[in-house]
Image (tube, coloured by chain):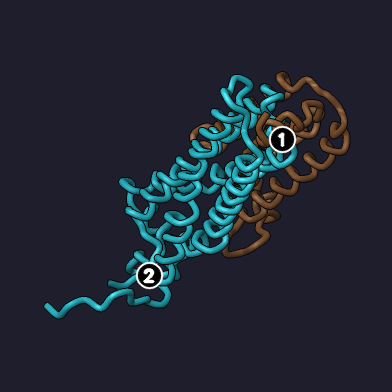
Chain colours: A cyan, B brown
Amino acid sequence: MEITARGLWTMIHGMGFGALYLLACSGAMVELWRRYSPSAQTAAAAADERFLRIYLGVIVALSWMAVLTGTYIVYPWYRAAAPPGTAGLAAFPQRLLLSSPSTSAWHSIGMEWKEHVAWLVPVSTTMTAAVFFRYGRSLRNHPPLRNAVLGFLAVSFLAGGIAGFFGAMLNKNAPVRGGATIRIVQGEEP
Amino acid sequence: MSRDEASAAAVSTNVPNGSGAAAVLAAGIGALALAVIAIAADRIAWMKSAMVFYKPTGPLSGVTTSAIFLWLVVWAVLESRWRKKEVAMRRIGIVAFALLALGLLLTFPPVADLF
């Protein structure tokens, strides 16, 4: 069982930071919705507030790590230009997708959307965390502010989902490969 | 009254909403700025080359860095002006969300290609 260094980074970017962000974001939305509503049965305790601060801090870190590793580590490998006369395009995912009408839209729509829409995520999560750090439990006394934060968090979840979906489909159609090979487990001889 | 209830009651209900409004509106402006800069960099040749801050990533590096920078500057300005004020949060929230939705829509390539 082996994986290339580029494949590993793609996995860290998507399945590590990206998927973890999506999981964590859904939890934050539920928590903000339930515990910080003016009609909540019980007010959030100091311990709950501390927990949510840390939780939102982790979400912010995950969202930034996802876009930064995607933009500055994985994307350059994806968009690398093939030298003239290159016969096989497997090492040049963007060129490989654009070489066929049946796959070109994965780049022209999928990657073109993903590379921009993903950046809405850290903007929204950072804002959410900043507002919560400032207001904490008193957020329930500001329903319009809480609603706005929840709306941004929901859109960030949608944007992250779009980026994640296209990331998975792009990697299925034209995986980023190359670099050193990392052997995870030595298989049995046939 | 339990300790948690007492602690919750002690939380100020008088924190002005200006700081939160500044953060929300700045995020909306930042989202729209990202989409607008991306479209401009795709359409205008000199801007496309000017947006190459890091060659391996191409114009995406400049587009995102510029939008993030703009977002943070707008946030800092709004924060300094609204920090101690009560503002019309509902209206600001609607405007900010509209900017965010527009930013999301404009990043969709078939829509961006209309410009």
* Chain ID at mark 1: B
Which residue position holds label 1?
B7
Crowd around label 2: few <14 · some 14–19 · many ≥20 (10 Å): few
- Give SS at disc 1: helix
For the residue marked with disc 1, what is the amino acid?
Answer: Ser
Q: Position of residue A165 (x, y in %)?
A: 40, 44
Q: Residue at x 33, y 74 (%)?
A: A184
Label of residue A10 in the image: none
Q: Nearer the viewer, mark 1 or mark 2?
A: 1
Where A12 sits versus B85, above or below? below
* Chain ID at mark 2: A
Q: Position of residue B38 (x, y in %)?
A: 62, 44
Disc 1 and disc 2 in contact, CB within 8 angstroms: no
Q: Residue at x 46, y 65 (%)?
A: A9
Q: Position of residue B4 (x, y in %)?
A: 66, 35
Where A67 sits versus A45, above or below? below
Label of residue A86 in the image: 2
Visible in this render: residue B84? yes
For the residue marked with disc 2, what is the amino acid?
Answer: Thr
Q: Foreground residue, B71 or B38? A: B71
Q: In the figure, is residue A120 to the left or right of A168?
A: right
> Which quarter of the rendered picture does the N terminus of chain A lie within?
bottom left
Image mark count: 2
Q: Residue at x 68, y 33 (%)?
A: A137
> Which quarter of the rendered picture does the C terminus of chain A lie within?
bottom left
Q: Are marks 1 and 2 on the same chain?
A: no
